[in-house]
Image (cartoon, rainbow, N blue to C red):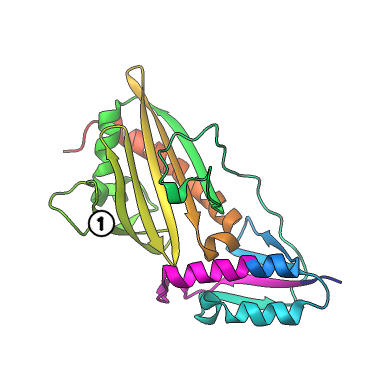
Amino acid sequence: MAQLISLTLSKDANEIPTTLADDHETVAAFEALIKKSKAKLHCDANAPAAVLEVPGGSADKVLKVLNGLPLVRNGIVVVKPGVKTKPKGTKLRFNPKKTKVHWSPDFDPNKVKVPTYAYNEVLCKAPVEAVFGWLMRAPRWPEWYPNSANVKLRSFAGNDLQHGMHFTWNTFGVHVDTYVEEFEPPYRIAWRGFLMGSEVIHAWVFERDGAGSKLITEEVQRGFVCILARDFFMQGLYKNHQLWLERLAAQAEKGMPE
């Protein structure tokens, strides 16, 4: 009879230092464990949690390996056996025919495995110049987008994002270290972020639509926490990115930032 093991994000995860090396080591070992033990991972669309379904007789060996993984050993993820039910996941997935992003080779969902992905778009009455103008004025995001806080530009002069700029901010209650990788005013901007050992690329594409514009944003995430909470993160990303686009459109329709 199969046994169920829960894997949940620690309440203190955002306060515990971790590295990408720890994360990558954890991901590789975890994927190898699933393959070797023939376990199945079930993600929860309603909480940052997952359940590992392990064939009968393998639970003790699997638990031993799990507890030795860097992100588990360091307290980022909590492992508990004896769960009674499996969660139901979501069907949100990457659509290669729909993407408009110039993905970095190491993060292209067409070529590499990314557990978390979200796509959103809205139409806006304002021209792309106003849309881009408000998005690049990052320190003012919290004025109109509630899921952002404490935005700090860490390199270069001025109040706007630039190519290669390092900036930090809080979103989803998590501190993110971010670097602008693509910057093509007023049509494209993308940044790479690092949080809790995971990696993120968030890209924006703005297209002219008559006198107005079409706003598109896509994000991919990878890392152990993203694997465990992929359905929860995808639901959260979709909901909050839709809000971000709607608020950005409304702000741009008021005119260019001063």
User: Residue 96, image x and y in percent?
Assistant: 55, 36
Q: Residue at x 32, y 59 (%)?
A: 169
Q: Residues within 10 Å of mark 1 (few under 14, many from 20)?
A: many
Q: Secondary structure at mark 1?
A: strand
Indicate whether residue 80 is drawn in magenta.
Answer: no
User: Residue 82, image x and y in percent?
Assistant: 75, 77
Quarter holding the N terminus? bottom right
Q: Residue at x 38, y 35 (%)?
A: 205
**75 shown above or below 223:** below
Quadrant hosting residue 215 = top left
Q: Residue furthest right?
A: 1
**64 shown above or below 248:** below
19 with respect to 68 (left or right): left
Q: Residue furthest top?
A: 210
Indicate whether residue 24 is drawn in magenta.
Answer: yes
User: Residue 76, image x and y in percent?
Assistant: 51, 75
185 with respect to 212 (left or right): left
**229 shown above or below 126:** below
Quadrant hosting residue 227 = bottom right
> Does the image show residue 151?
no
| Amino acid at the residue labelled 1 | His
68 with respect to 212 (left or right): right
Q: Residue at x 53, y 65 (%)?
A: 225
**8 shown above or below 214:** below
Residue that badge 1 annotates = 166
Quarter holding the C terminus? top left
Quadrant hosting residue 231 = bottom right
Q: Residue at x 55, y 66 (%)?
A: 27
Choose between 78 and 60: the one closer to the eye: 60
Choose between 153 and 212: the one closer to the eye: 153
Give, as a single range, the part of the protein colored magenta: 4-31
